[in-house]
Image (cartoon, rainbow, N blue to C red):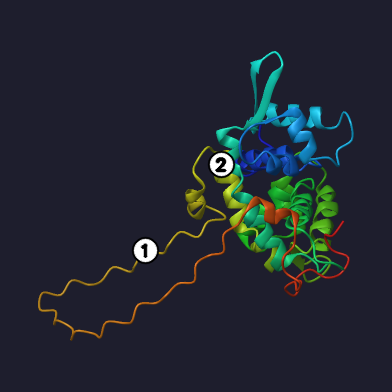
Amino acid sequence: MAITALPPDTDADIARVTEVLAMITPRWNVRILLALSGPPLRYSELAAKVSWLQNGQLHPKLKSLCDAGLVERTEHTARHVTYGHTERGVALLPVLPMVVTWAEEHLEKADRPLPAIEQIEDSLTLLTRRHAAAILWVLKSREEVSGRALARIVMPSSDGTNVYPPLRQLVADGLVDTDGIGMPYRLSAAGDGLGPVLGALSTWSAGQPLSQAAQHPVWGHPQAKPAPRPWVSTQSRPAPAAIPSARTMAASPAWHNRDLFSHATTARPKAAIQAGGPRR
């Protein structure tokens, strides 16, 4: 069933991403997924790694992650049961550093340095607001859209005024900009910066490798094809150019799961979102 007035492929894409966010955003889910990085663990071993969960909280969380296909329960014997990532769960983990990168650049400055895991949780909270994904998709595709047009596209079967509460929230969160009442809406720099995250979530939800995210029709950045050169029968040969010296590329810093639970930096980038924004 269509959820927007967008083309069926786009509508299905948004629905898949919304479903992925619903899997991982509930409190503690990302922390449990990170705690399971490595060899499968018995329930007691996992409980020791997420000791902040109260008695009775871990089991339903594990069940929901198993139902979502991110965690698998293996019963070796009646008294030996382990939990570990599925292949789909492992494939999803590389999206988390992308979320941290976006949060460090765009989230409102906190009063204290935040562990990366909190950066992830804060960021996911913004994306799971109702109709947020659909609104972001439309604004990315069409650049500027009036509230009335957004209502017809994002919630075609609803009252046209229902689009304004989520729009106002996205403006308050710093993901959407407008010049005032009655003026068109557009993505902010922070909203546009979500491209790698949303593209990766879309790619993963479609069962494709994350390397394909750059080709996403909305959030990707496919390489531009070189302009065709005219064919000349008597084209002169250019003089040989000096060979440039090889550039040494700085290696990208390795990201480890343990980094999510501690914040190594003392200074945060200048926040792009005004005070009163997304921090919970």
| Quadrant where the N terminus is found in the figure | top right
Of the image marks 1 and 2, the number of the one nearer the N terminus: 2
Residue 1 sits above or below residue 253 on the image: above
Q: Using the image as rendered, state which of residue 157 and residue 91 is in the foreground.
A: 91
Q: Residue at x 58, y 51 (%)?
A: 199
Relative to 41, residue 75 above or below = above
For image coordinates 81% across by 48% down, the residue present is 160
Residue occupying the point 24% across, 85% down: 241
Determine whether, in the image, residue 34 is placed left or right of residue 219. Answer: right
Q: Is residue 204 above or below residue 280?
A: above
Image x and y of residue 91, in percent? 56, 41
**Is 269 in front, or is 53?**
53
Query: In the picture, which quadrant includes the C terminus?
Result: bottom right
The image shows residue 152 at horizontal and vertical percentages of: 72, 48
Tell me which amino acid carries mark 2: Ala
Residue 183 placement (x, y as % from top left): 77, 67
Q: Nearer the viewer, residue 207 or 79?
A: 79
Tag 1, which secondary structure? Answer: loop
How many other residues sit within 10 Å of disc 1, few (<14), some (14-19) or many (≥20)? few
Which numbered disc covers residue 225?
1
